[in-house]
Amino acid sequence: MTALDSMLYCQQILLQQPLYLACQLSRLDIEGELVEMAILDTDERVLLDELVKPRSPITDQAAALHGITAERVAAAPGWGEVWAKARPILKGRRVGVYGQDDIIAALTRAHKRSYLRPDLDEGQFFCIQRLFATYRAERDSRTGGYRTYALLDAALHLGLDPEAPFGRRSADDARMLRAILLIMANWKSGSVQVDLDDEWKG
């Protein structure tokens, strides 16, 4: 896929008016539970921004990343209640995430631990991390495929300022997803930096 192909593909996705989903976890490994989830629409409106009470403790390393502590989620709803709000928002929509496999795994774990029926439509998700890897087109010498980047690294490569003053919250990450897709599509990229900076400085 050429740079032009990548840009046109991102534009096609934007024409579908996708949603952007980001979440934070209780720990930084494959056993991490959801402690927060945010969903933004194409116009950057916050459709959902909820803390989630996990069944296991939040590690110090995870809390240092996102600023969410056990005290903050003590009165938060469980995953079943949050998912009941999220499901109708996501239904039938394209949903951009960063690190699709990890996000799907986290959502699946949350469903299982809350004894919910597995009703995720994995086909509606698309991975902005993979799109950025194609856009950047830097080969990984070990695998021969395109190198993937962490979310903050991708933002910095595109000239965005990803610093959030009180920890990286889910809504902040969702705004970054939107900004990255807009820039890769060469779509209103001039206004994205201002929007992001104004949001985080406010």
Image: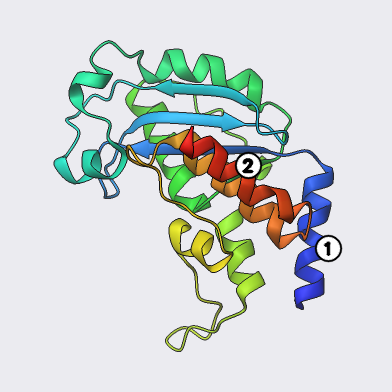
What is the x, y in percent for residue 188? 78, 51
What element does badge 2 sit on? helix
Quadrant containing the N terminus is: bottom right
* Crowding near the residue tagged with mark 1, few <14, some 14–19, many ≥20 C-alpha atoms within 10 Å: some
Q: How many labels does the image show?
A: 2
Question: Is residue 16 shown left or right of residue 183?
Answer: right
Quickly name the residue at label 2: 195
What element does badge 1 sit on? helix
Please tell me the numbered disc located at residue 8. Answer: 1
Residue at 36% from the left image edge and 13% from the top image edge: 77
Residue reaching furthest to the bottom = 141
Q: In this view, does 21 lie above or below 161?
A: above
Q: Verify CB contact (< 8 Å) between mark 2 and mark 1.
A: no
Residue at 54% from the left image edge and 44% from the top image edge: 197
State the residue in front, 194 or 171.
Answer: 194
Q: In this view, does 140 lie above or below 76?
A: below
Tell me how far mark 2 sits from mark 1, CA to CA. Answer: 23 Å
**Res. 66 visible in picture:** yes
